[in-house]
Image: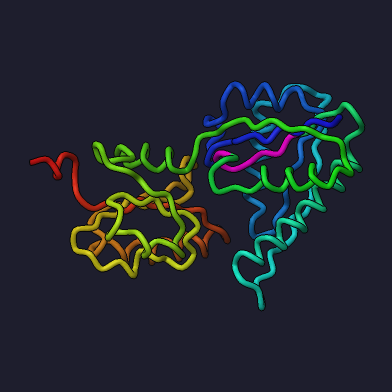
């Protein structure tokens, strides 16, 4: 049986790697490195830098592979993601057949944590369900972008005794600020915070968290919204890609006490 390690590597800072992750990377036979084109070569470079720092086992092999591009034309969001995952699962299956024999192990390096807004687990499960390749897998947790964001802004995630919602930009207006007082927003290419009209809302935004290119902006949403939009656009133009996240908050600790 082949064994896959799905390893969380944090938000890009090599120092985010856990001892458990380092040990896993040093015991596998092969590490798969995704390539997403020239514009995102930096993402592959970060993975390679992590391996150069921590993989001391000279027997470990490294295999680059191309990631299929998600097709969105004439598809709903859910359908486009489902089709995309199917393509990636076929890519994974071929990788396992070509580069792993029975009894061997491999690793994928997953940005942040594999359980938070990442689909590597789902995709490996698809391969497993097809039963063409006999495999099992383990998940190694990593530091999430949420942890990196709150650490950089030196804020707690939640208000005392109050819940937190993690959502996407597409769904933000359904809940904030009417239903929740703290919302963490991921995967927001449309900048949904611009549509929030509440003078009491505050935003804590960050991009490239944990890296030397980290950018953070915080303040009353109405005051800093335009600056975030401009800063984000400039950073994306400079790097060719952007990974950002933000927390919206309304209210304060103990403000619901009689």
**Nearer to me, 97 or 148:** 97
Q: Residue at x 37, y 37 (%)?
A: 151
**Nearer to me, 91 or 236:** 91
Q: Residue at x 65, y 37 (%)?
A: 49
The location of residue 88, given as percent across then percent down, is 75, 54
The location of residue 161, given as percent across then percent down, is 25, 37
Q: Which residues are magenta?
A: 107-113
Say left or right for 87 vs 217: right
**Res 164 → quadrant:** top left
Tell me if I can see residue 215 in this picture.
no
Tell me if I can see residue 112 in this picture.
yes
- Residue 44 to residue 238: above or below: above
Say left or right for 204 vs 138: left
Residue 10 is one of the magenta-drawn residues:
no
The location of residue 252, given as percent across then percent down, is 19, 45
- Residue 197 to residue 11: above or below: below
């Amino acid at each position: 049986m082949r064994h896959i390690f799905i390893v969380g590597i944090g938000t890009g800072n090599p120092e985010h790697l856990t001892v458990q992750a380092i040990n896993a990377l040093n015991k596998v036979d092969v590490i798969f490195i995704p390539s997403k084109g020239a514009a995102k070569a930096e993402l592959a470079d970060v993975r390679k830098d992590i391996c150069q720092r921590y993989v001391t086992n000279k027997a470990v092999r490294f295999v680059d592979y191309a990631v299929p591009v998600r097709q969105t034309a004439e598809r709903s969001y859910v359908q486009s993601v489902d089709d995309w995952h199917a393509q990636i699962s076929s890519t994974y299956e071929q990788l396992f057949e070509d580069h792993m024999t029975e009894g061997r192990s491999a690793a994928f390096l997953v940005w942040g944590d594999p359980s938070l807004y990442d689909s590597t687990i789902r995709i490996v499960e698809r391969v497993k369900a097809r039963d063409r390749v006999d495999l099992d897998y383990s998940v190694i947790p990593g530091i999430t972008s949420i942890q990196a964001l709150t650490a950089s802004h030196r804020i707690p995630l939640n208000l005392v005794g109050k819940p937190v919602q993690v959502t996407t930009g597409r769904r933000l207006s359904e809940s904030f600020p009417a239903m929740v007082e703290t919302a963490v927003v991921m995967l927001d290419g449309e900048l949904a915070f611009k549509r929030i009209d509440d003078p009491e809302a505050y935003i804590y935004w960050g991009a490239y968290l944990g890296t030397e290119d980290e950018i953070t902006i915080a303040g009353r949403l109405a005051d800093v919204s335009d600056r975030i939009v401009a800063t984000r656009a400039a950073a994306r133009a400079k790097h060719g890609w952007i990974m950002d996240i933000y927390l919206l908050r309304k209210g304060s600790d103990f403000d619901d006490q009689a």
